[in-house]
Image (cartoon, rainbow, N blue to C red):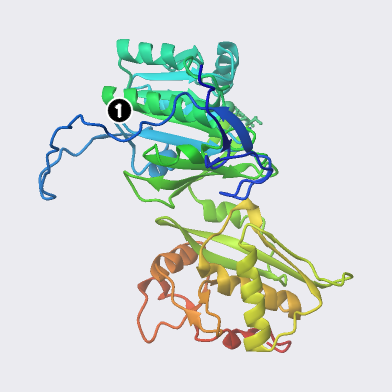
């Protein structure tokens, strides 16, 4: 008998290796490579059999516009691109305990008002899910609940009954009985997802797959599933904070970078309609090292406080610590401040934090970070009614960023009276018409704000 073929598969990124190694060459993660037995070898060429000729269509044809199903939870609907499309597959990734099961239970309970919804839990017993539903006040919602992990049974059920929305919580607990690998391995996760998605697409069911990501990469990360689904949502948040952010990182049916903001409370996840007010709620006025960044998250402006602390270091190599922003971006802003503006940061420790636990990815935050750093170093506060945005280039020039109007409008709505922004070259911004605009061309131009006699 031929020996079964073995291969070594990274459980985080799915790349295969010839031999085991401690570190995956593909994604750089440690301890993620696991031996798996391949079911059968890949086909060797096509052989003599001929296929059929495929048909081509013009781009300009008319296609039916698919109706969308909305849950009524606005923050959730926005992230899905305005509602769920029939036959689409969505992946919700996130750390264990962040609230994936909670949000999906809340969403399906709302969707169940006019759609047939099924919730299949592979992690929790029926009683546990019922208890959660009771706690959330959703016990009366007509969601059909099941505890199952065998994909063959699930698919058989889907063939018999048609559902509009199906939740699989989580894909790592599901298994196909004709594969040898254990549930949670890349081979199982990939095969189960493929079967479920294929059936769901054919039956017009919208399927949610829940996927845990662990730092250790012991469970097959949902990254291997990202290309198989239509929409990838990540549920982010800091265990230390109560709010959670649902972020669309891929969406075939809507814009990406949209976020939905929720707050985890006693009775589940509540929508946060005005995230800026929440992120700024604990801000102290007139302290040095703090700047308000007017950012954009998808189509929505969000104001957040950026805090910096520059303090003399007892260490030979000063520390640079960042929370909520990119470490290398901070190094760049520090280098520009030193080299182009003559500010000596040298032997100081630098700490930077985006207050509230939000992760900012926009380069437009550069100028706010630079202002917070300059303010901490000089001890002079940034005016408390000023918002800041702008990208910093390597020669110290301040570059324009998109959606200046929307950012300024949001700031004005929240009572801000001033804004430090890139030079508009004489262009008008209706958004900032009631505000003092400080237009800066070069990073050096912000320094007069931080002299003692200002
Ligand atoms: P859960 O949805 O089970 O997380 P996941 O499915 O991503 O693993 O969320 C569990 C956490 O949320 C748990 O730590 C308790 C907390 N929680 C609340 O604080 N309030 C609530 O009403 C609920 C249902 C959960
Ligand atoms: Mg869960």
> Looking at the image, which residue is at 31% across and 43% down?
253
Q: Residue 320: image x %, image y %?
A: 74, 66
The image quadrant in which ligand 2 is located: top right
Q: Residue 441 versus residue 432: which sits nearer the camera?
A: 441
Which quadrant, please, contains the C terminus? bottom right
Q: Residue at x 50, y 86 (%)?
A: 441
Q: Position of residue 308 (x, y in %)?
A: 70, 68
Q: Name above or below for residue 394 compared with residue 105.
A: below
In the image, 64: left or right of 217? left
10 Å neighbourhood of mark 1: few (<14), some, or many (≥20)?
Answer: some
Q: Which residue is mark 1?
A: 201
From what the image shows, is residue 402 above or below residue 447?
A: above
Look at the numbered disc 1 and give the secondary structure of its residue.
Answer: helix
Question: For residue 289, what is the image quadrant?
Answer: bottom right
Instruction: Tell me where residue 319 appears, x and y as whole percent.
Output: 78, 67
Residue 284 shows up from this direction:
yes
Q: Work out whether 256 lies above or below 308.
A: above
* Quarter residue 157 falls in: top left
């Amino acid at each position: 008998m031929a020996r079964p073929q073995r291969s070594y598969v990274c459980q985080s990124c799915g790349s295969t290796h010839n031999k085991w190694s401690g570190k995956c060459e593909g994604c750089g993660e440690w301890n993620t490579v696991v031996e798996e037995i391949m079911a059968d070898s890949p086909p060797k060429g096509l052989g003599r059999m001929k296929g059929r000729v495929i048909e081509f269509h013009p781009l300009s044809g008319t296609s039916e516009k698919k109706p969308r199903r909305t849950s009524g939870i606005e923050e959730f609907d926005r992230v899905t691109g305005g509602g769920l499309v029939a036959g689409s597959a969505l992946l919700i990734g996130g750390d264990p305990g962040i609230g994936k099961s909670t949000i999906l239970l809340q969403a399906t309970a709302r969707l169940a008002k006019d759609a047939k919804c099924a919730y299949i839990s592979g992690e929790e017993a029926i009683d546990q899910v019922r208890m959660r539903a009771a706690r959330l006040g959703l016990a009366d919602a007509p969601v059909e609940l099941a505890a199952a992990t065998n994909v063959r049974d699930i698919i058989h059920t889907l063939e018999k009954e048609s559902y509009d929305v199906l939740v699989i919580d989580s894909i790592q607990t599901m298994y196909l009985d004709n594969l040898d690998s254990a549930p949670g391995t890349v081979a199982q996760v990939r095969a189960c997802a493929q079967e479920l998605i294929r059936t769901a697409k054919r039956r017009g069911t919208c399927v949610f797959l829940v996927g845990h990501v662990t730092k250790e990469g012991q469970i097959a990360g949902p990254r291997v599933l990202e290309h198989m689904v239509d929409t990838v949502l990540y549920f982010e948040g800091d265990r230390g904070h109560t709010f959670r952010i649902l972020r669309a990182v891929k969406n075939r049916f809507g814009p990406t970078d949209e976020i939905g903001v929720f707050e985890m409370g006693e009775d589940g996840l509540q929508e946060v309609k005005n995230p800026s007010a929440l992120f700024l709620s604990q801000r102290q006025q007139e302290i040095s090292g703090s700047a308000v960044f007017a950012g954009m998250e998808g189509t929505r402006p969000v104001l957040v406080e950026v805090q910096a602390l520059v303090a003399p270091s007892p260490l030979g190599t000063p520390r640079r610590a960042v929370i909520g922003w990119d470490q290398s971006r901070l190094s760049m802003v520090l280098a520009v401040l030193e080299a182009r503006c003559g500010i000596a940061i040298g032997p100081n420790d630098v700490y930077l934090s985006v207050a509230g636990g939000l992760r900012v990815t926009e380069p437009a935050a550069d100028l706010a970070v630079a202002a917070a750093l300059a303010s901490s170093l000089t001890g002079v506060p940034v005016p408390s009614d000023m918002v800041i945005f702008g990208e910093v280039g390597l020669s110290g020039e301040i570059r324009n960023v998109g959606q200046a109007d929307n950012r300024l409008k949001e700031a004005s709505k929240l009572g801000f009276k001033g804004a430090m922004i890139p030079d508009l070259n004489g262009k008008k911004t209706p958004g900032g018409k009631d505000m003092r605009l400080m237009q800066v061309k070069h990073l050096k131009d912000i320094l007069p704000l931080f002299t003692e006699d200002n």
